[in-house]
Image (cartoon, rainbow, N blue to C red):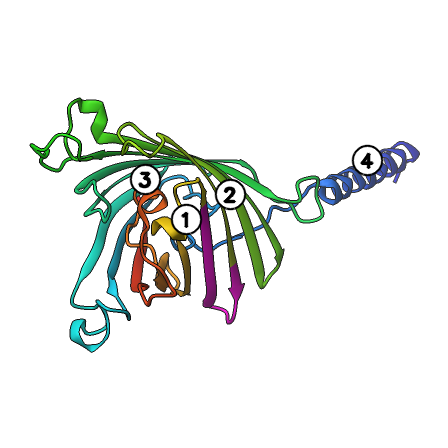
Amino acid sequence: MSYDECYIISDMKNLYTILVCCLALVAANAQETVFETFKDTRVINSHSVETIKQGKMDMRISHRFGDFAGDAGGWRSFYGLENATDVLIGFEYGLTDKFMVGINRAKGAGPLRQNVNGVFKYRIITQEINGRNPFSLAVAGVASVTTMKGSETPGVLSFFDKGSHRTSYHLETILARKFSPRFSAQFSFGWTFRNLVESADKNDLVNIGAGFRVQLTKSIGLIGDLIFPISELRTAANDYYPPLGFGMEWDTGGGHVFQINFTNATGLVETDFIPYTRTSWGDGEYRLGFTIARLFTL
């Protein structure tokens, strides 16, 4: 082998060494994002920070039964299983990994029924492992329109003098962190607006919320959430209560998540259960509910 050939080989080795070092440096500086802060796009009543991946469609079926205990519950109603306070079926789609949209139809549990709800959620920040982003941040919104027949009695909420009286909206920001492989928590700040309210009420309703998830086994998690409306009207003295829920969820694999829960909320959509929850855990007015979520690739 000639001197020139040895010199070329030596240069190539040096170049290779430099390239490997550069790749190692890039890999060391690259931050791995946190995966599945929550298993589903919902906790129980509230949205979670999660979005649907691009090209995936989520079919959702949710059900809320009647009071489990209290005056309307117990054996006479088979612990609420003979009644349904709300039923929802909908579809949601991931336009990108961070932006999802959806539409659903809910029976409704408040004064406005037969609701069609549009949904969007955008994930602004994703938590990184040992990175500069210690949390995830998302913004979610709901637009609802009631399709129920209008009342002929002026002064009631279902007397729709204008088409806009049928609509209501909800917007919230969600801040979440996965503290460990077994525990995640989130906090939310929301604003709900209704175009038509009772005379003693206000159109705007600010609310705060919190949620958590505890991983019990590889496929089973314990979940819970609370939403607190900030309003002088919405107190226990006026027969309004914060929606509070606890439940279990099973990730069966293959994009199928099943959730069973107990909550005092009768409605399934923010524009319904945030302003109109008038049932109390203390009076046995909590109910069994479930959600089936199935992901499809389109």
Quarter-of-image position of residue 73: bottom left
Q: Look at the numbered disc 1 and give the secondary structure of its residue.
A: loop
Quarter-of-image position of residue 248: bottom left
Residue at figure coordinates x 51%, y 43% from the top left: 188
- Marks 3 and 2, the one that precedes in the sequence: 2
The residue at the far left in this view is 152
- Marks 2 and 4, the one that precedes in the sequence: 4
> Which mark identifies residue 248?
none
Q: Tell me where residue 98 appears, x and y as whole percent.
A: 47, 37
- Marks 1 and 3, the one that precedes in the sequence: 1
Discs 2, 4 touching: Cβ within 8 Å: no
* CA–CA distance in space, label 4 to label 1: 71 Å
Quarter holding the C terminus? top left
Q: Tell me where residue 189 appears, x and y as whole percent.
A: 50, 39
Discs 3, 4 touching: Cβ within 8 Å: no
* CA–CA distance in space, label 1 to label 3: 18 Å
* CA–CA distance in space, label 3 to label 2: 15 Å
Residue to which mark 4 is pinned: 15
Amino acid type, label 2: Ser
| Residue 224 lies in the magenta stretch | yes
Q: Is 9 displayed left or right of 287 in the figure?
A: right
Residue at figure coordinates x 9%, y 35% from the top left: 151
Magenta segment's dominant SS is: strand
- Marks 3 and 4, the one that precedes in the sequence: 4
Q: Look at the numbered disc 4 and give the secondary structure of its residue.
A: helix
Residue to which mark 2 is pinned: 188
Amino acid type, label 1: Thr
- Density class for disc 4 (Cα within 10 Å; few <14, some 14-19, many ≥20) is few
> Which mark identifies residue 235?
1
